[in-house]
Amino acid sequence: MNTAYVNSSHPSIPRILDLAALMAKKSHFLFGPRQTGKSTLLRRALPGCRLYDLLDTSTFLTLSQDPGRLGQETMPGDEVVAIDEIQRLPILLNEVHRLIEERGVRFLMSGSSARKLRRGGVNLLGGRARTRVLHPFIRRELGEHFDLNRALSRGLLPGIYFSDAPDEDLKAYAGIYLQEEVVAESAARNIPAFSRFLRVAALCNGTIVNFTKIANDAQVPRTTLYEYFDVLRDTLILQELPAWRQSVKRKPIASSKYFFFDPGLARILQGRTLAPGTPEYGLAFETYLYHELRCWSDYTDGPPLSYWRSTSGFEVDFILGDHTAVEVKARPTVPASDMKPLLALREEGKLKRFICVTLEPRPRQIGDVLLLPYGDFLDALWAGEYQ
């Protein structure tokens, strides 16, 4: 069998997620959408670690025929063992469980989806492994390579952000997703219907979903639509932003919003181009800010994220835990009238900070609302000022 050993000879953008530190304590599942860089991170963070790549045909066939080979080949010096694409062979988790219990081996098990693991009734190790998600690049990781317009148009998947043909690669990514995630895992039987749904869902990115309208537009039954949304969530393509429901003076809406995990993928599925000052640009900017907030919450064990909308029509884009309200405006000059939703939420007396993230060049204050250039906001966020 072709057993690989990890090396770190290939340079890449350093990632915020510290796998080595995580693996020093306990076994982990590392999930993330395809092409977020899981395999690259694994190889760089764990040099010398024994690695089983289940995309390798010989490795997959050998372990599928005899899962016990994993234990036979794990030597006394193997403190950490990595299994890439674990969802392709869930039966291995029984052997992983045994090796954790009997030998104290720590396992890193990576994959693009937990769907097959959760739905197959397999052994999920009963708390013996924690779960982390690797997201596409963030501004802090890219450093001097970061460009906002590039991030909004191309997205932040490593291979596509630096591509010389980003639109072609994004279209290919959508096709690979349909083929490998949906077809291979039998998540949806009618692929043309799912493909239509995917594009309609992308048009609803960052909005409260009207399931009846989407079902009609995608030409699928409503019950099927719920299954399709589960597929997108399980494969980490779609992320749910729940409603903040603690307001009293103004009745809150309870429905969730949904964001695609990458602004570039959302744009290509929508069939749109972006130009500053347009509503499409504003929504892409909001999707990008959500991505940064989601990464911050996941990587730092930060507070949960939500949004607030009242039945009377006031809406604030993001609520961080129970302390900070964040409104996003993709404008170089933001009028005071745009502060009305934040000021309405301030009347509830439940939150400490009210921030408007903008494209303005310098910070300024309007009453209790602090307007921040997006870079200043992200620097403060990752410096721990909003925990």
Image (cartoon, rainbow, N blue to C red):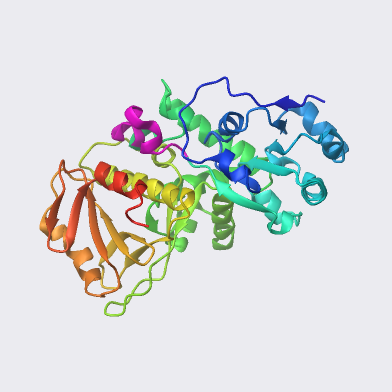
Please state the extent of the stretch shown in magenta in the rendering: 136-151
- The spot of residue 14 in percent (x, y) is 46, 31
- The spot of residue 215 in percent (x, y) is 49, 57
Is residue 294 rendered to the left or right of residue 68? Answer: left
Report whether residue 271 is seen.
no
Q: Chief secondary structure of the magenta span? A: helix
- The spot of residue 107 in percent (x, y) is 70, 43
- The spot of residue 30 in percent (x, y) is 60, 44
Q: Is residue 140 magenta?
A: yes
Quarter of the rendering occupied by the C terminus: bottom left
Q: Can you say whether 348 is above or below 167 in the image?
A: below
From this viewpoint, which residue is outermost toward the bottom? Answer: 249
The residue located at (24%, 57%) in the rendering is 355
Of residues 40 and 384, the one nearer the viewer is 384
Q: Quadrant of residue 65?
A: top right
The residue located at (72%, 25%) in the rendering is 4
Of residues 53 and 226, the one nearer the viewer is 53
Count of marks, rendered view? 0
Q: Quadrant of residue 324?
A: bottom left
Is residue 211 rendered to the left or right of residue 360? Answer: right
Report whether residue 1 is seen.
yes
Q: Can you say whether 312 is above or below 156 in the image?
A: below
Of residues 167 and 89, the one nearer the viewer is 89
Q: Is residue 73 magenta?
A: no
Q: Can you say whether 92 is above or below 142 in the image?
A: below
The residue located at (25%, 44%) in the rendering is 376
Quarter of the rendering occupied by the N terminus: top right
The residue located at (60%, 34%) in the rendering is 42
